Image (tube, coloured by chain):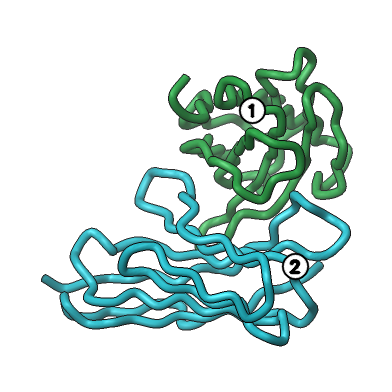
Chain colours: A cyan, B green
Amino acid sequence: GQQLNQSPQSMFIQEGEDVSMNCTSSSIFNTWLWYKQDPGEGPVLLIALYKAGELTSNGRLTAQFGITRKDSFLNISASIPSDVGIYFCAGQEGGSNYKLTFGKGTLLTVNP
Amino acid sequence: GAGVSQSPRYKVTKRGQDVALRCDPISGHVSLYWYRQALGQGPEFLTYFNYEAQQDKSGLPNDRFSAERPEGSISTLTIQRTEQRDSAMYRCASSVREESTEAFFGQGTRLTVV
């Protein structure tokens, strides 16, 4: 099936630093989403992107839907300890308005 | 309820046994999804319901896996004759609209087959 390449696999940063992660796919996606998963919890939707080139912010988070429709990135500015968790990108291909393909996740650790 | 509720949270079963995993979606949500998440991986799509109708079961790995949502609310994912490779976190999600990508996930059921 469709594969999403998410990088980096893990990041260890100092509190206050900015962080960036990205996702690429081998085919075109109609929707890109970014989720955060805390230990013992299910993924929680952070940002949804619906149009190529779209740049959307949610507080300190900013995500963009790549112009080629095959990639997306997520930036977190001024990281804080509660940003710790696993961040997943997910995409939805044409022909399906519900089925999501997830990346393998980026494990973010923030050192206070 | 306030969120998607799944039970049990943890299930350990012997190989060859059948298991039933339950999902109680957010009240009023018409769409329900089952995903499976292996350790170190993202969730993988299993099946999708719109009300009580199973619209897509293309992600179910084989015929030992089945799911139902008879009254358009609670759903059960059943795995027959479990195998060790079935061990994973099984996640349910629901959305208020049909075919919405903005789904809310439950805490999952951690299945371990020994």
Residue reaching furthest to the left: A112
Where is residue A112? Give x, y as percent.
11, 71
* Residue plotted at (28% across, 82% down): A18
Q: Secondary structure at mark 2?
A: loop
Where is residue A70? Give x, y as percent.
71, 81
Chain to which the residue tagged by mark 2 belongs: A
The image shows a total of numbered marks equal to 2
Where is residue B45? Give x, y as percent.
72, 50
Looking at the figure, which quarter contains the C terminus of chain B? top right
Chain to which the residue tagged by mark 1 belongs: B
Q: Which residue is mark 1?
A: B29
Q: CA distance from mark 1 to mark 2?
A: 23 Å
* Residue plotted at (68% across, 71% down): A51
The reply to whether the C-beta atoms of the residues labelled 1 and 2 are less than 8 Å apart is no
Quadrant for residue A60, please give it.
Answer: bottom left
Q: What amino acid is labelled 1 in the image?
A: His
Seen from the viewer's position, the closer of residues B114 and B27 is B27
In the displayed structure, B64 sits above or below A109; it is above
Quadrant for residue B49, please give it.
Answer: top right
Q: Secondary structure at mark 1?
A: loop
Number of the label disc, if any, that sits on residue A30: 2
